[in-house]
Amino acid sequence: MFDYDVFFSYRHRPLDSEITQKLFNLAENYRLPASLRERGMHGVRRAFRDTEELPVSRILTDTIDKALHSTDCLVVVCSTDTPSSEWVDREVATFIELGRADHVFPILISGDPDTSFPASMKLIPDIMDRLMDIRVPGNDTRRMMSLAESEMLKVIACIAGCTEEELAREHQLEQNRNVVKRAVTCAAAFVLILAVSLSLMIKAQNFREEAEKREAASMQILNELTYGLPDRLADVPGSYSRIKDILHGNTEDINKILRLTRNKEAGEYEAAVNYEKLATAENVLGMHNEALDSETTAISLFETLAGSGYEKAEAGTASGYNNRAIILNSAGRYEEAGEDYDKAIGMQQALAHGDDLVLARMIFNSGSNAIDLGNGNLAAERFEQSLGLLDSMDKSADVLDALSTVKYDYGVLLYRSGLYNDAADMLSDAYEDINALVGMNDSLQNRSNSIQIASMLAACLTDAGNYEDADRYYEEAIKDAEILAQDEENISYQQMLAELYNNRGLSHNIRGNYITADEYYSDASDVYGKIYAKTGSDPDRAAYAVSLLNTGENAFKAHEYDKSERLFARGLGEYSQVSESLGEYHRAQYLAWRSYYELIHLRDYNAALASASSALELQPDNMLVKLNYAYACLYSGNSDRAVSLFREIASSGLGEADTIKRDLEAQEDAGMISDEINAVINEMQLF
């Protein structure tokens, strides 16, 4: 039996001491899940940390030595100041001498293992298996402790005598049970109030005052069912399936209340809002058909109310068409989405007292859908309209959210056209706006948007050749995205992480780091494959296909030709099934990839030129299309056109010049012959 469950070893420096104090409180206040306590396990009952700076000496005091001998686990707070501490090193060495090296847990707050581990710790063979990493840019202690809450489960599990996976599972289950208890409490309150309302109906039929009280209670319940509980749960990881279930249950409860209330129209409006929220939850879960059914029901209710003159119903109808368009877009039905967006915008503009912020969002959504359709001109026009409305407003949280979203998609449009400097400026503005919003409200959705913008900005900086800044954005974004993606039911988080892995792979591919690029590309394919297996949607299948093609292109450069050909065949097979249905942009992308496959693997240069020409007709400003068209020209006898295009593409950014150079080197290594290859490679080195 140990006197202490955990001993905190640390250097007495401001950051180290602050983090240790917070870890100490976290450990002692952590409550082990009831299911594990029932099996006789316990968490941290007592922790030890030294609060005084001790003199430099290799001899431990009696107090420290006694505490180390009677402690189960040693947590070492590691920073760049740690290796210079004789005391920390000796405390680790003592734990090793006691035969408990496997109970030493490093928690990294700055630097890296090479620069922050004490010498004795580096002697422990499996120490990295127990590493707890809570480093964040700027040493933001709030964010560090947010990471520590999950990282410290490694130590708690060791003390309890169970696996970390078991503890994490039981910990999550207990949190889920607590959410359910709150939901049950809410439901119980509803039943109680309903019973009171029914009693009041019988006893107070002739008393207006009592009837008004009953009416107020009924509408209060409606408001709680439609807005209260679902909105509180929306920012809890892994909660959307529960929100969906609650909203499904609400439809029955609302119908009951509608039979009690005299204000039928108000109740029916709440029912429509409930269906709209249900549709949003179903869409997040990838249940597109169910979401469309729910949203169509909401629109029908709104339209009926609008026909009877109910004041808020016209705005509700416009909102309904906008939300249905969002769902159609998620399902890859871009033409239908465009029609619904146009309806929503027209209705919103016709409102006597319309909200310009709502209108700006609808116009932006239409522009975003236009990108997916491949209509860049319409997208740019809509984005400019939306920004024009937003720039005239005070920078509230809602306006910052809208600004960052519009600027992000505008940046994506500029990036796809190869306007990297303009794209970087737009995305930098978006990143500034979203981080200002995070400062006001650090919600999961806002953090997710910040990560997405950082990812796109990093990709833009990569193609512009600014690799150092790109790496910085990638590292921060991936670390945060991996935390959010632990919520496996939230498809948007999984898509965000997969896109980050894919773009990070591209960044390494451009620089010739093919082994590292393959690791990121493979991770992206794994995640995209799981997403598509869950949703079955055409856009997710297209994303999976492109990730396979990227991995195949990287394998070609690494001289793994058989692997490359297999991946190209798989990727093109998947893409061919959906490219036609997804619109012009994806048709052009598919043809460009097919052209490159015909070029490097089939060596059918005429077929490659035909595919690339068809892609160019669809998307003449798309950088991937232009690049693969240039390669096809190079090998099919039109070298002058190829060289002209290479110069045009390379002038847009150093990253593009590096891409051309490495592509041509790989083609030459594979035995592809053109008189212009070496001259173009030498010219690319001048950019």
Image: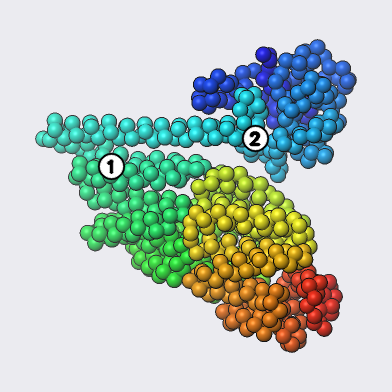
Q: Dot 2 corresponds to which residue?
A: 151
Quarter of the figure with residue 117: top right
**N-terminal-most mark, 1 or 2:** 2
Above or below 622: residue 95: above
Q: Residue at x 65, y 54 (%)?
A: 523
> Which SS class for mark 1?
helix
Q: Residue at x 62, y 74 (%)?
A: 594
Q: Residue 221 location, x and y as percent? A: 30, 39
Q: Residue at x 34, y 52 (%)?
A: 275
- Horizontally, residue 544 falls left or right of residue 111, namely left
Q: How is the image coloured?
A: rainbow
Viewer-proximal residue among 455 and 441: 455
Residue type at mark 1 is Asp
Above or below 147: residue 423: below
Q: Dot 1 corresponds to which residue?
A: 253
Residue type at mark 2 is Glu
Q: Is residue 426 visible?
A: no
